[in-house]
Structure formats: structure tokens, C-alpha cells
Image (cartoon, rainbow, N blue to C red):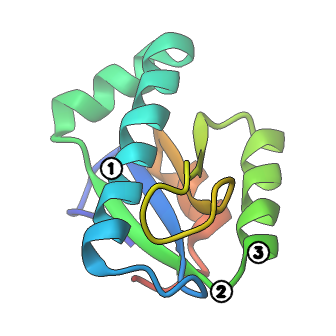
Amino acid sequence: MGCGLGLKYKQVILVRTDLGMSIGKTAAQVAHGAVSAAEAARIGWMEWWSGWMDEGQCKIVLRVKSEEELLRFDEMAGREGLPKALVVDKGLTEVAPGTVTCLAIGPAPSDKVDKLTGVLPLL
């Protein structure tokens, strides 16, 4: 999966489909994850972040079926040493407070991200 051929860096955002969030809610949660993980990369993985910024900030949104599946990917991303951000909703609109809605991984080298998430379908 890629935003374009030859891009060295990417970010993926995994979204839970079991929550039935509206399109707008989903977009907001994806944005929370994208910004938070990018900030984590800027602080701890500056070379990856800079490369990703220079290439145009490739982002891909993928789906997972459950909180358990999402948390497995969170754990794997941590073990692989990738920047990440788990989004936990405040519960002001569509979901209960504390609901884990999505996980953003990267920006990081595309091959590292693909190794971890390449099996997931697009949202």
C-alpha cells in the first residue's frame, strides 16, 4: 500500500469499524491520531519526520474490527520501535468516555510500516 511509488516514509491510521462512528466523527478521530503520532515522530524520530514532511506527508487509513485487534497493533508497533499514538475519546459526542477509536503509526519508513500493517484493508 502506498500514497505513491517510491515514497520512503508513511503514516497509517487504523480505525475501529465496530463502533459505527459517523463519517465526521471518524475523520476527527483520524485527525487526532495523525497529528499526535506526527508530533511523537517529530520529537523522537526527527529524521523520519523530516523525510515524511519533505515527501508530502503520505497517510493511509486502514480498518480493524475491534478494540482487541487495535491494541495488538499498538503493542506490535511499540515492540518495533515505531512512533505511534492511540486515540482515546473524551466521550462528548458519539462514543462513551474512554473509548479507544484509532491508532496512528508513523511517520516511519514505509517498509517498516508495511511489515506491520500491510495485511489490513483500506477503510
Farthest front residue? 92
Residue 85, image x, y percentages: 58, 41
- Quadrant where the N terminus sits is bottom left
Q: Which residue is mark 1?
A: 31
Badge 3 element: helix
User: What residue type is disc 1 on?
Assistant: Ala
Q: Say left or right for 40 vs 52.
A: right
Are there few (<14), some (14-19), or many (20+) residues within 10 Å of tag 1? some
Left or right of 68 in this view: 93: left
- Counting residues from the start of the chain, the first of labels 3 and 1 encountered is 1
Characterize the local packing of mark 3: few (<14), some (14-19) or many (20 or more) Cα atoms within 10 angstroms. Answer: few
Amino acid type, label 3: Glu
Measured in 3D between alpha carbons, the distance from the residue under mark 2 to the one under mark 1, in whole angstroms, is 19 Å
Quadrant housing the C terminus? bottom left
The circle drawn on residue 69 is: 3
Q: Determine whether 93 is above or below 16 in the image.
A: above
The answer to which of 21 and 68 lies nearer the viewer is 21
Spatial separation of the CA atoms under disc 3 and disc 1 = 20 Å
| Circle 2 SS class | loop
